[in-house]
Amino acid sequence: MSEHRRKPPQPQGGGRAAARRAAQQPTPGRRAAPSTHSAPPGSGRGEPPYGSRPGARRGAPPGGAAGPGGRRRPPEQGPGGRGRRDGGRSGAKRLIDYPRAGKTGFRRWLPSWKLTAGLIVSFVGLILGSVGIALAVVQVPSAQKAAVVQKNVYYWADGKQMVVAGGGSLNRQIVPISQIPLAMQNAVISAENASFEQDMGVDPMGIARAVVKMAQGGETQSGSTITQQFVKNTYLSQEQTLKRKITELLISVKVGATQDKKDILAGYLNTAYYGRGAYGIQAAARAYFDKDCADLTPSESAFLSATLNGPNLYDPYGGQGPAATPEKNLKRATDRWKWTLDREVQVGRMQAPDRDKWVAAGFPKVQKPKPATNRAGQIGYLTDLADNYIVAHSKISKAELDKGGYQIYTTFDRDKVDALSKSVEEVRKANIKPKVRDVDQFVQFGGASVEPKTGKIVAIYGGENALEHFTNNADYTGVQVGSTFKPFVLAAAMTHGKRNPALGPKQSDSQRTLVSPESVYNGNNKVTLRTYNGTVWHDQDGKEWHQPNDGDEDKGLVTLRTAMQFSVNTPYIQLGMDVGTDLVQEAALKAGLDKDQLASLTPTFSLGTSAPSAIRLAGAYATFAASGKQVDPYSVTKVEKDGKPAYEHEEKSAQAFDSNVANNVTDVLKTVVESGTGTKAKLGDRPVAGKTGTTDGNRSAWFAGYTPQLSTAIGMYRVDPNAKNQEFLSMRGVGGQPTIHGASFPAEIWADYMTEALKGKPVLQFDPPQPIGQKVFGDGASPSPTPVPATTPSAPVSPSATPSKSPSASPSPSASCGPFDFKCRIGGNGGNNGNGNGNGGKDGGASGGPGGPGGAGDPTESPSPGGNRRPPGGGGGLFGGPGG
């Protein structure tokens, strides 16, 4: 037969005969009748009960023949999917028997021990091979590479160069291990990596302990060895990624296997960052003790080893952020210093008697920081502020920034910075004379100026000289802001409303009554403080609180506008209770204040016991200037390195308040400047809104205000930087004044600076407010007020105390004729624009007039336990952070 007509291959088991038998199968549903014949007894073969083999096959159950005893043999797949009868074995074996042949159900997918062992061996081999290749390819770092320090270049907002600085305050110097005292080596090894001299560059057990500790919710631990730290400092970035960590481990293994331990330790100590811009042990010894590292004592060495754990948190003179105050840092450093000495004894690197000697001698004396000389005046404050902002808002670490090589473009306007500095120094020179009056010693000023719609910080005043005064007074200092906080109370009242006394403390806005600035409250001195439902408020000791006004003066029934105008305390502390201090806090946060800089929610929270920085306060007031649009203040627009972008500011904004709420706050604050405590801040025909603030014990004074183009806050306080217990001191008598209020020197500085900063700028108007809320009546007030007994002649009660009779009062100042509107009053001369030159009459106000010395100023006499102590704070409150 021709090859071209060859028959196709026949299935195994039968050929043509099988085909014929298959053709004889009954159609579905029909079967051949079973035969009645059976095999003879004793027959060796026997016939199937169906009479013949074909019959037996036709009668067999589907899916395979039955074996003895009726057991079916599983079909085995042959060519074409036909069943096989070879016991499950095929002629060709598979290289990987998976899914497993001859198994059924889940057993088919259960790998055999051979397969499992093979996979493990293959995986281990792959890892070892990859590690071997990586170790062969990776380069070992050089300590000299990390010693290269460049400078950063800072630019003004107009693009002109401000200063070339950075790269550490001292030049780095690589020193051999022979010049690093054994005491320093022992301290670092004991504290950082006790197994350093025995490990292979990495510590698997240390890494495992760190993972377990973090999984249990304990404090984060690195598990890094000294070798790993050396590798990271010299070769890698500080980013926390899996790729960087794997690279670090690989290089550490190679370094540990190829380099001497003494060389690794010297490399680590010469490249580590100790704070104060100091890289390497020689620079650190100079920065903290002004000596060569070879002369370090075991006690000083134990302290320097602590700074490696986080220099921002261990410098006794403070660091960046509220968590890095001098007090907190000193305690933290002392505890770590003592622990390191104990640890040296524990691991056998110091004798116990020597430890006891150093502990008895006390914590080593650390010298004050010495900024670089090219950062004199305000430049040091500006560059520090920019540095803090970069570290807090980018992936650039402080250590990387100090290595230099960055071009930093700031928001600072040189002319405005100079104008603000000049305004402060003129007031200081004319009034503050520490050689004449002891009380004039330790007086500090701070200020910041922010653009409302952009958030750009255009100017700051951080202190007299960054080389002599190291705390940036424009940033977080812990100084309470007093009555400048009251606008946030008013904003909360107009946003959420006064609570319904008949309902529970948690009420929706629909259950409340929105408050108008023309609402009436009791302005008398020491009014009994009540909760929102009228019950007397008691503190944790069960005592009532009676809030004082300035000079213990009774002011009678006043509108909220008038209470703001003349900074009367009692209406606003009660308003805060009626609205809820939690919502007052919410309003302050929405405006742009930082929660870490806010006080606890006691009733006096509404009167300014919080301590936001000048930058934050100016930024929050800028939210009102921008009709409720909030933008976080910022100081850096972009950062470049080697011509490539390293950071760029992203503009973000949010509508913090309804525009009409913000515009009504502005309208009320305009009244303060036009005819209240802030008249010294007038800028001619340019509209100004602002608020004075003075705190308990006359320990600080503020003026914060804005125009549509610029928002500025100026603070003033006294603190002795050399005192063992840092606390704010009273300013009574400073500058020859009986008391210092926000209406005095701070308002004078503000007006002088704003006049210069806005010179040549168009006179813009604020957005006009629309009527808002209802005229509500606080505790002790009513729609038809009755006279309230006055303890002084300056507090008459008349219907003029409720300047509007309509349910929805007009927000215009002209709609009110309160008891402090002296043009509407009948009686004696109440003073000349609050300057303190008038004589009080029966109806003419207190002697001296409002806002002037002895007049109706704005101290917040508040129950703030320890209020004279310096609250937590250091440099970098806005832009820095713990460990920053």
Image (spheres, grey):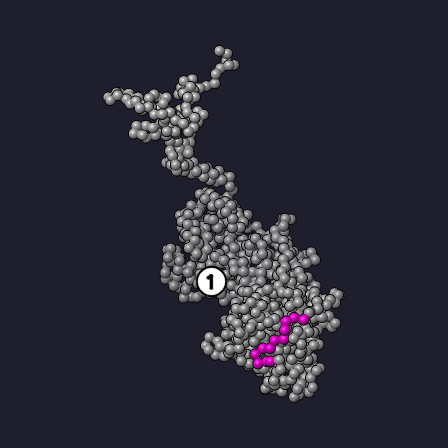
Residue 97: horizontal and vertical position, in percent? 41, 32
In the image, residue 512 above or below residue 407: below
Which residue occupies 52% across, 58% down?
883
The amino acid sitting under disc 1 is Ala
Q: Main secondary structure of the magenta part?
A: loop
Quadrant in which the C terminus is drawn = bottom right
Q: Is residue 453 left or right of residue 210?
A: right
**Residue in front for this viewpoint, 632 or 558:** 558
Q: Residue furthest bottom?
A: 842
> Which quadrant of the view contains residue 157?
bottom right
Name the residue tied to disc 1.
333
Residue 621 in percent (x, y) is at 64, 67
Q: Is residue 67 above or below residue 145?
A: above
The answer to which image quadrant residue 78 occupies is top left
Tell me the residue at 69%/84% (across/down): 825
Residue at the image position 70 percent from the left and 67 percent from the top: 767
- The verdict on residue 454 being magenta is no
x, y percent for residue 184:
45, 56
- The span shown in magenta is 771-782
